[in-house]
Image: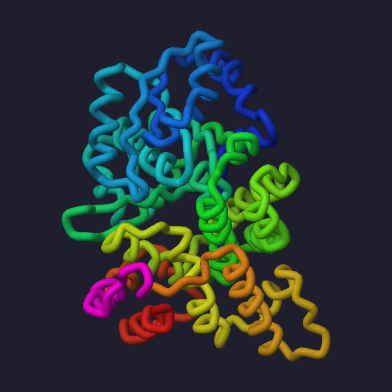
């Protein structure tokens, strides 16, 4: 079976990478950018790092700072109105996954028309390239700055769905680790566990390839050995750089191998309860992993090795379990080992979320198929 690999044609990485952006945009003759971000990043003046770079290269801009933590269809519609009113020829997202996903929706609908929901009932449904999109990343977690995924919330029916489309791929992704130094401990931890989940789910995905495997395993190595250090000390530049590369590699893996039940279930928790995505992944990952390890035992034994587990003397099943225990230990050490019930999740929504999870596109590549009852059981284990 043939495969296709998607990623941005240009990625700028490392400390002060954003300082390369203005000249590159000038070379492409862009005139005005719609900056898509959230109000908190504007208020702490982190967005100034971007606007100063644009101004220095005579590139005009307008700012849409209405992005919610779980970006909504309405956020995309609002951004589209400002894009049109300001006559922008470029979209630049600034922030984490919420900003990038919202910007992707804006850029895709701007050229293809309709509603973002129109592109969620399959994969690669758009017919035209999106308006040029540049992503400037400030977290080491979602990898949305370089993937073909966008996650959107429908507030009316409490669902959260992925849009998977090759035309969501940014033309330039910027991962400047200096923009990540000020990230709070909890956000660092939650986004880091999100990145780990990407790598684990991509490695056991039914669509995995040698390229995605290599990316996923290296991502697990980098994240597992650096996340605790960067949560403990956000000024640790070496750990920040390592996490930046780890989350990017995880993005390379899952953007092309897709994901599994952790993400399809976490999407429902975000849609119904508006919970932090990375935290939901951290809570669900060990439980889904044990469900999958019954079928993908050797793959989870590989994950254990990447997590730094010494499996000498263990059989494959024991090594797989040791890897899952290592995931739990890392989550505990960074403060994400919580319970869904502590976050306000109620029993009466579990069946609704389980049904929607199985209809989520991420479920298609989970290595072991589950019934609605089995998904409910996993939710219960995490309660």
Q: Residue furthest right?
A: 312
Give me the residue at 63% from left, 79% from top.
325
- Residue 321, horizontal then vertical, whole percent: 64, 84
Residue 365 shown left or right of residue 122 in the figure: right
Which residue is more in the foreground, 130 or 293?
A: 293
Judged from this view, the residue extending furthest toward the left is 156
Q: Is 194 rendered above or below residue 67?
A: below
Q: Is residue 330 left or right of residue 279?
A: right
Name the residue nearer the viewer: 274 or 218.
274
Task: Report the magenta stretch's main SS.
Answer: helix
Find residue 350 and report its image quarter: bottom left
Q: Which residues are magenta?
A: 341-354
Q: Is residue 128 visible?
A: no
Q: Which of the 4 quarters of the picture holds residue 162?
A: bottom left
Please tell me whether residue 140 is drawn above or below residue 328 in the rendered image.
above
* Side (left or right) of 139 relative to 244: left
Which residue is pictured at 29% across the width and 62% down the height? 273
Location of residue 42 by image quarter: top left
């Amino acid at each position: 079976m043939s495969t296709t690999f998607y990623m941005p044609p240009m990625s700028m990485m490392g400390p002060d990478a954003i300082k390369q952006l203005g000249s590159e945009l000038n070379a492409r003759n862009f005139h005005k950018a719609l900056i898509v971000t959230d109000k908190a990043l504007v208020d702490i003046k982190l967005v100034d790092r971007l606007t100063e770079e644009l101004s220095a290269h005579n590139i005009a801009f307008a700012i849409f700072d209405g992005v919610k933590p779980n970006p909504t269809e309405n956020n995309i519609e609002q951004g589209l109105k400002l894009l049109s009113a300001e006559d922008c020829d470029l979209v630049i997202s600034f922030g984490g996954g919420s900003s990038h996903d919202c910007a992707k929706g804006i850029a895709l609908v701007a050229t293809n028309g309709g509603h973002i929901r129109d592109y969620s009932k399959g994969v690669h449904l758009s017919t035209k390239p999106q308006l040029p999109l540049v992503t400037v990343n400030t977290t080491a977690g979602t990898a949305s700055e370089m993937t073909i995924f966008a996650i959107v919330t429908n507030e009316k029916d409490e669902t959260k769905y992925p849009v998977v489309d090759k035309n969501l791929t940014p033309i330039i992704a910027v991962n400047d680790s200096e923009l990540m130094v000020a990230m709070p401990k909890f956000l660092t931890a939650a986004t880091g566990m999100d990145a780990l989940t990407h790598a684990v789910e991509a490695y056991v995905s039914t669509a995995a390839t040698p390229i995605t495997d290599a990316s996923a395993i290296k991502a697990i190595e980098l994240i597992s050995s650096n996340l605790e250090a960067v949560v403990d000390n956000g000024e640790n530049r070496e750990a920040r750089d390592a996490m930046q590369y780890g989350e990017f590699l995880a993005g390379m893996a899952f953007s092309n191998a897709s994901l599994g039940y952790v993400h399809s279930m976490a999407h429902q928790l975000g849609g119904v309860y508006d919970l932090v995505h990375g935290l939901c992944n951290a809570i669900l990952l060990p439980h889904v992993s044990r469900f999958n390890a019954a079928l993908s035992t050797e793959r989870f034994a590989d994950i254990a090795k990447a997590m730094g587990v010494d499996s000498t003397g263990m059989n494959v099943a024991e090594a797989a379990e040791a890897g899952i225990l290592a995931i739990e230990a890392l989550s505990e050490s960074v403060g994400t080992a919580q319970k869904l019930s502590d976050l306000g999740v109620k029993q009466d929504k579990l069946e609704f979320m389980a049904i929607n999870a199985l209809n989520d596109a991420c479920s298609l590549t989970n290595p072991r198929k589950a019934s609605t009852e089995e998904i409910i059981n996993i939710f219960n284990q995490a309660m």
